[in-house]
């Protein structure tokens, strides 16, 4: 088979993360806010990819290439594909870390106003309570109750205080959310 039919186009995928999903978009001109723990996770992933995983795959590709015919060599073809995925993820993480602004939410410990990093318990107009933590775009995990600071619910809640009612426009119509409780991580004592 001709290489013309097997060549993949990396240019269209440059802004994707390694999972093939589009990178979460940041609002025009906004900063990439991230918690210290989130920044460290992204940095650790980047270092792991560069220092451990990529060199292993390069060795496999080098070994597979030395075996001769590359057109039907599964180790070679898979290795090259995996290298492209790793390199794409490295580019993504490098760009995101370069523009990251680390915000320590513990500076607001004791406050009843909602800022980045707050864990908020709210009740909707049907009385259903939900607890969310407002996180950075690259670290939010909805399955763990974490929402991005650019999500509609976070934007509606930001700057509100305990006891406030805020409006949230949803596809199902306007909803009212009442802020029940606001918590922040406890500030760590400085090492002496």
Image (spheres, rainbow, N blue to C red):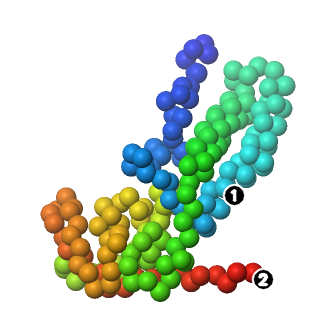
Q: Earlier in the sequence, mark 2 or mark 1?
A: 1
- Name the one closer to the observer, 138 or 71: 138
How far across and down, in percent of the image, does residue 53 sit?
A: 74, 47
User: Which of the numbered marks, if any, corresponds to residue 44?
Assistant: 1
Depth check, mark 2 against mark 1: the one in front is: 2
Instruction: Say which quadrant the C terminus sits in.
Output: bottom right
Q: Residues within 10 Å of mark 1 (few under 14, many from 20)?
A: few
User: Marks 2/1: CA distance?
Assistant: 26 Å
Residue in the picture at 49% in, 30% down: 12
Q: Residues within 10 Å of mark 2 (few under 14, many from 20)?
A: few
How far across and down, in percent of the image, does residue 50 sit?
A: 74, 46
Residue in the picture at 45% in, 44% down: 22
Q: Identify the element where label 2 is drawn.
A: loop
How far across and down, in percent of the image, does residue 188 sit?
A: 64, 81
Q: Is residue 146 visible?
A: no
Q: Identify the element where label 1 is drawn.
A: helix
How far across and down, in percent of the image, does residue 177 sit?
A: 24, 76
**Residue, disc 2:** 192
Q: How many marks?
A: 2
Residue in the picture at 47% in, 46% down: 23
Relative to 10, residue 137 above or below: below
In the visual, does 125 lie left or right of 90? left
Relative to 186, residue 138 above or below: above
């Amino acid at each position: 088979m001709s290489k013309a039919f097997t060549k993949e186009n990396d240019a269209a995928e440059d802004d994707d993360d390694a999972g093939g999903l589009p990178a979460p978009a940041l609002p025009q001109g906004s900063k990439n806010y991230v918690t210290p723990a989130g920044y460290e996770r992204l940095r650790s992933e980047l270092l792991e990819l560069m220092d451990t995983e990529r060199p292993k795959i390069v060795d496999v590709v080098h070994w597979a290439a030395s075996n001769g015919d590359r057109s039907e060599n599964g180790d070679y073809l898979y290795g090259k594909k995996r290298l492209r995925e790793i390199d794409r993820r490295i580019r993504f993480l490098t760009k995101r870390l370069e523009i990251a602004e680390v915000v320590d939410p513990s500076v607001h410990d004791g406050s009843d106003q909602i800022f980045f990093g707050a864990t908020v318990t709210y009740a909707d107009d049907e009385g259903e309570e939900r607890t969310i933590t407002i996180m950075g775009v690259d670290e939010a995990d909805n399955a763990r109750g974490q929402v991005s600071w650019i999500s509609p619910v976070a934007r509606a809640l930001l700057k509100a205080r305990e006891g406030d009612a805020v409006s949230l426009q949803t596809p199902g119509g306007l909803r009212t959310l009442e802020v029940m409780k606001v918590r922040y991580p406890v500030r760590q004592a400085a090492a002496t």
